[in-house]
Amino acid sequence: MSEKMQASEPLKILIVAPNASSRFGGEAFLPLKYFQILHRRGHPVRLVAHSRNRANLEETLADEIGAVDLIEDTVWHRALWNVGKIFPRPIREAIFGTLLNLVNEIFQAKLIRQLQRDGKVEIIHQPIPVSPKAPSSLYGFGIPVVIGPMNGGMAYPPGYEDLESRVERRFVAASRKLAVALNHLIPGKRKAAALLVANARTRQALPVADHPRVIELVENGVDLSVWEGPGRLRAARDRDAATPFRLVFMGRLVGWKAVDTTLEALRLARAAGVDARLDILGDGEERPRLEELARQFGLAEAVHFLGFRPQGECAAHLGNADALILNSVFECGGAVVLEAMSLGLPIIASDWGGPADYVDESCGILVAPAPRSSFAHRLAAAIQRLAADPALCRRMGTAGAQRIRDEFDWEKKVDQIVTIYRDALKP
């Protein structure tokens, strides 16, 4: 039964997410889905975000922008951002990301108290950052706070240590230990009404292991109104083994996405006689190297780098593809896997992290990333298997689409979160 069908009063919900944005996808997009669906259902929901995303939020939320309160940029934000840029990603995210989040929370506290005085909030939801170790200072407001769903506790597979420097590895290990102390000093997570985690791995990574209310709820979902629109369900279309096999990658072009291995697998599959093509949707620091690598592999005509695309265009590209490939080696979630499944596409993914939580043999092929030396060969074999068997693709696509409708529909996800809100509000 949907939440609308329950005879309950609307909830005054405040979603606190300074980094909320549709521009970057991933965790930044999650707060917007909660906000939009709750608003559509008639809840007087508000969103606290950062002013740097003002233009994106005005475009994305349109008529709903009046329910958004923005934290203005300050000299502290700019200083931390500029200094953080010079450090490697793990250090930048762990130290400067945490500091920026705490600075945001100092300024957003004033907004929250004003909304309380105006009678506009009775429960707070902090969906990001999704890191289970990040401390939260959202406490002391006299109303329940729900944090999550969080997702983390990741490590690289054996053999991929070079993707992190020795300094970065040591820093990450030390920062995870320090997080326990920080969460005692800044006890937002300890005092929260509920902590939401995406999986058992994240539950184990929580720095507050004795919290009385930890709930498993996957952080990603699929808006079927976008991803399962009329004519988009790919599984309904026929393909014969003689036509090109069209793969799509969606995501940031960064090292741990292992797109260089994707290109090597494509080269191997084509050398074995498979007419496989690849569209790459996304941008990032790795793009120039990957474009050069595609030229070196002789894939210039088979690989198309299309850059960042809005969600609707991504859905259209997937709707014309035969499979999604995501052999990332450090993927906590992987919303693109769910989006592709919703369109009836089979999945080729790493048997590691988030994709392994979503995909099973009924709807895709999980490929072990270790040993690294033969990872591309195993991926190439998966490409060959799907390219040679259109009927298998259709069966996997149909099973995946059904799984999305059963388990990952955003509407059902919001049903669950509203139940959690109501439980948190009980005396």
Image: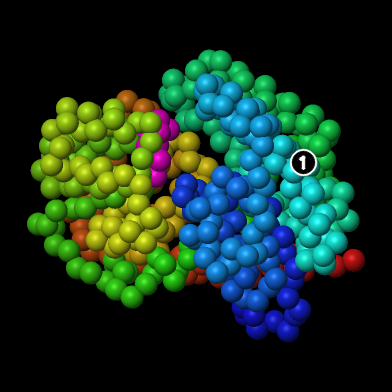
Quickly name the residue at label 1: 106
Residue at image x 70%, y 82%? Answer: 6
Which of the two residues, 218 or 299, is positioned nearer the viewer here?
A: 299
Quadrant location of the C terminus in the rendered image: bottom right
**Magenta residues?**
251-258
Give residue 348's position: percent from left, percent from top: 34, 48
Q: Amino acid at mark 1?
A: Ile
Residue 59 locus on image (x, y percent): 48, 60
State the image coordinates of residue 391 (x, y, percent, origin top left): 23, 64
Q: Is residue 115 left or right of residue 196?
A: right
Which element is circle 1 on? helix
207 versus 235 height, above or below: above
Q: Residue shown at 16%/37% (left/top)?
A: 299
- In front here: 318 or 311? 311
> Is residue 383 or residue 118 the one in the foreground?
118
Q: Residue at x 14, y 53 (%)?
A: 244
Residue 192 lies, with reference to residue 413, above or below; the image says above
Give the residue drawn at x 39%, y 69%. 228
Residue 203's x, y, as percent?
68, 44
Does the magenta-highlighted stretch encompass residue 255?
A: yes
Secondary structure of the magenta portion, mostly? loop
Q: Nearer the viewer, residue 286 or 414?
A: 286
Q: How many marks?
A: 1
